[in-house]
């Protein structure tokens, strides 16, 4: 089964390029055919296109379009095929930021067709996920209106199709385009089966499309209340940490609680660094992480459909990052301090306040304070930086960040297992490498010498195999590994493994200990190691790098199996309908969070008191 599918539409319209210049208005020129060729060239150059199954699109039927659009509107767009230049211009003027060209109807129908083909490929199980590279984009288009370069609402039609043809009951739409997809919002406003999440440049209502209903307090209507989630960015320059904080503190809690059967992504990359529309500063790598975070949902059934993205270089790189992640490659490290800015925190809080009554998972995040709209039509509360200075910052930051784009090849082996305990009963998924080799005897003995008293014979034999596995990981031959060892040797083995990673130059290690396992004493003050004891005896912050939290126990064998499957790239199972954690657990977590927040800034959602925050950008 192929992992990832690319469906395309709107490429290869040979003459479109020059004709568009004739028929377009200047404000629409950025939505050009080169956007698709740049994205495809990027994918080809990095060998990603070759790893995908490629499907080409058919034009969507009138019936498909009718899932969202009115018959009159469809007829109107159809008519544009035969209109002359002046008539086309006159029609375009009836809408906001739209141009029509004799080819528009065909391209727009192909774009919908591509999105539908992708949904079919994923929902029939032919592929795991995919990206539809299409234009024109869709998320601004409405039942009877074109808007913001969009003619038909590709993603909304895809969602309706998934509901109608496959009987889906819960679909999540993640709109990370930098503009508000008001078209999608209107179409599903009162529909609780579609959870629509959009973040967007808003600037307190001073950015296009200047809508009151783009603010956080627009949560949907009637039965659909709580199923529209708007996160308005009130400043430009949002960075990786701001986007991650939005996912961690808003989108993911809601998504887990919603438990979608399918994730559709309105994948606009005008929210990436370098884009003239968005003026944001998230790097292309960020989209690998956003994609990865979505892969824990809906059995990893993700259909992404291109929306905006007007800086060709940034667009191409971001598309590559997303496709690479959809193919199962690990996400590259993120640059920049993981500290969300003050304005982002305020935005996140405003969504939490607006949504808290609709979502159990948010109820503990809400900071006390007045619920108020951030919209101020009469004037912005804070002066914005002058346009020109914003641009300069973005451009300055752009080239070094874009050129450090990190594309490490995926390790050849996905998961390796060193079974070092005779009879260890691990039910492993197929495709996992069984590693039988051991490290050189002298080397193993050298390590053991440091821990002599703590190794028994069996543990010593195991250690050789584990060191070998570790070498594979450190050399980039193996992506992940599982090793077993005897209960007695666990602490000493872990100690050796940590020391070996450090001597190999590791700067930061995360150790997650499940069950009672003491942190090696000689590493107690080493800030290169973050020690997280899940299912420790009590909730405790021994230091900012040594944390213990009591969580309910699962069977270790079940855990090992789930872990092996997840490491091997399988979609994690749905957690089922949402249950609130027990009050003791919630309390313990709140207690931990309060202590950890000053050091770990991504935990922070409440705005810090004035004066204690980092300097204003
Ligand atoms: N003078 C997408 O990214 N800008 N559409 C209008 C008004 C329109 C963006 C400026 C931006 C539309 C899919
Ligand atoms: Zn956009």
Image (spheres, helix red, strand yellow):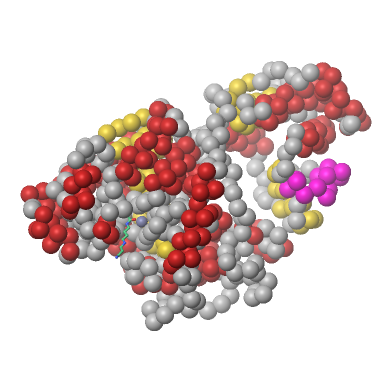
Q: Nearer the viewer, residue 115 or 125?
A: 115
Which residue: 65% across, 67% down?
614
Residue 29 lies, with reference to residue 301, above or below; the image says below
Image quarter in which the C terminus is found: bottom right
- Residue 578 image offset from top left, x and y in percent: 51, 54
**Is residue 267 rendered to the left or right of residue 603?**
left
Which residue: 86% across, 23% down?
445
> Which range is magenta?
519-531
Q: Nearer the viewer, residue 559 or 179?
A: 179
Residue 125 lies, with reference to residue 290, above or below; the image says above
Residue extending furthest toward the right: 453
Residue extending furthest toward the bottom: 378
* Image quadrant where residue 521 sits: top right
**Is residue 472 rendered to the left or right of residue 2?**
right
- Residue 341 image offset from top left, x and y in percent: 57, 64
The answer to if 178 sits in the magenta stretch is: no
Q: Which quadrant contains ligand 2?
A: bottom left
* Image quadrant where residue 467 sits: top right
Which residue: 82% across, 22% down?
443
């Amino acid at each position: 089964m192929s992992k990832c599918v690319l469906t395309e539409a709107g490429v290869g319209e040979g003459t479109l390029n020059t004709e568009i210049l004739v028929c377009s208005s200047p404000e629409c020129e950025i939505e050009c055919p080169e956007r698709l060729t740049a994205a495809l060239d990027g994918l080809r150059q990095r060998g990603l296109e070759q790893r995908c199954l490629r499907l080409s699109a058919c034009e969507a039927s009138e019936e498909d379009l009718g899932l969202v659009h009115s018959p009159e509107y469809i007829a109107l767009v159809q008519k544009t095929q035969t209109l002359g230049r002046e008539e086309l211009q006159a029609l375009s003027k009836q809408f906001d930021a739209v141009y029509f060209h004799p080819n528009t109807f065909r391209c727009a129908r192909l774009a919908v067709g591509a999105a539908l083909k992708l949904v079919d490929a994923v929902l029939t199980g032919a592929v795991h996920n995919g990206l539809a590279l299409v234009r024109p984009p869709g998320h601004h288009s409405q039942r009877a209106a074109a808007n913001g370069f969009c003619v038909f609402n590709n993603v909304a039609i895809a969602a309706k199709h998934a509901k109608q043809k496959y009987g889906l009951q819960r679909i999540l739409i993640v709109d990370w385009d930098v503009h508000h997809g008001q078209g999608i919002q209107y179409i599903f406003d009162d529909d609780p089966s579609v959870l629509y999440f959009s973040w967007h440049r808003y600037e307190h209502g001073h950015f296009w499309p200047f809508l009151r209903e783009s603010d956080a307090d627009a949560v949907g209507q009637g039965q659909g209340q709580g199923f529209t989630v708007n996160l308005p960015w009130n400043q430009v320059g949002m960075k990786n940490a701001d986007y991650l904080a939005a996912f961690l503190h808003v989108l993911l809690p809601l998504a887990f609680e919603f438990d979608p059967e399918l994730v559709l992504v309105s994948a606009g990359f005008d929210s990436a660094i370098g884009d003239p529309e968005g003026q944001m500063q998230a790097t292309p790598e960020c989209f690998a992480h956003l994609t990865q975070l979505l892969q824990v949902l809906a059995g990893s059934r993700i259909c992404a459909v291109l929306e905006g993205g007007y800086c060709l270089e940034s667009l191409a790189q971001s598309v590559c990052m997303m496709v690479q992640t959809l193919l199962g490659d690990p996400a590259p490290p993120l640059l920049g301090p993981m500290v969300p800015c003050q304005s982002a925190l305020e935005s996140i809080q405003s969504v939490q306040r607006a949504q808290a009554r609709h979502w159990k998972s948010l109820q503990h995040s809400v900071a006390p304070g007045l619920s108020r709209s951030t919209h101020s039509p009469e004037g912005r509360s804070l002066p914005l930086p002058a346009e020109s200075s914003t641009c300069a910052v973005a451009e300055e930051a752009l080239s070094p960040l874009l050129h450090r784009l990190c594309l490490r090849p995926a390790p050849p082996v996905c998961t390796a297992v060193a079974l070092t305990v005779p009879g260890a009963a691990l039910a492993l998924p197929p495709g996992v490498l069984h590693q039988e080799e051991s490290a050189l005897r002298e080397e193993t003995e050298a390590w053991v010498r440091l821990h002599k008293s703590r190794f028994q014979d069996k543990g010593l034999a195991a250690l050789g195999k584990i060191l070998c596995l570790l070498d594979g990981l450190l050399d980039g031959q193996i992506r992940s590994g599982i090793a077993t060892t005897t209960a007695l040797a666990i602490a000493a083995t872990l100690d050796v493994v940590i020391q070996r990673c450090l001597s190999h130059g590791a700067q930061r290690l995360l150790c997650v200990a499940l069950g009672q396992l003491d942190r090696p004493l000689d590493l107690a003050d080493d800030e290169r190691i973050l020690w997280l004891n899940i299912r420790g005896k009590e909730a405790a912050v021994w230091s900012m790098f040594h944390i213990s939290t009591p969580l309910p126990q699962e069977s270790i064998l079940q855990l090992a199996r789930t872990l092996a499957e997840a490491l091997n790239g399988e979609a994690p199972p749905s957690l089922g309908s949402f249950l609130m954690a027990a009050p003791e657990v919630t309390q313990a977590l709140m207690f931990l969070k309060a202590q950890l927040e000053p050091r770990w800034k991504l935990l922070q959602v409440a705005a810090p008191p004035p004066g204690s925050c980092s300097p204003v950008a």
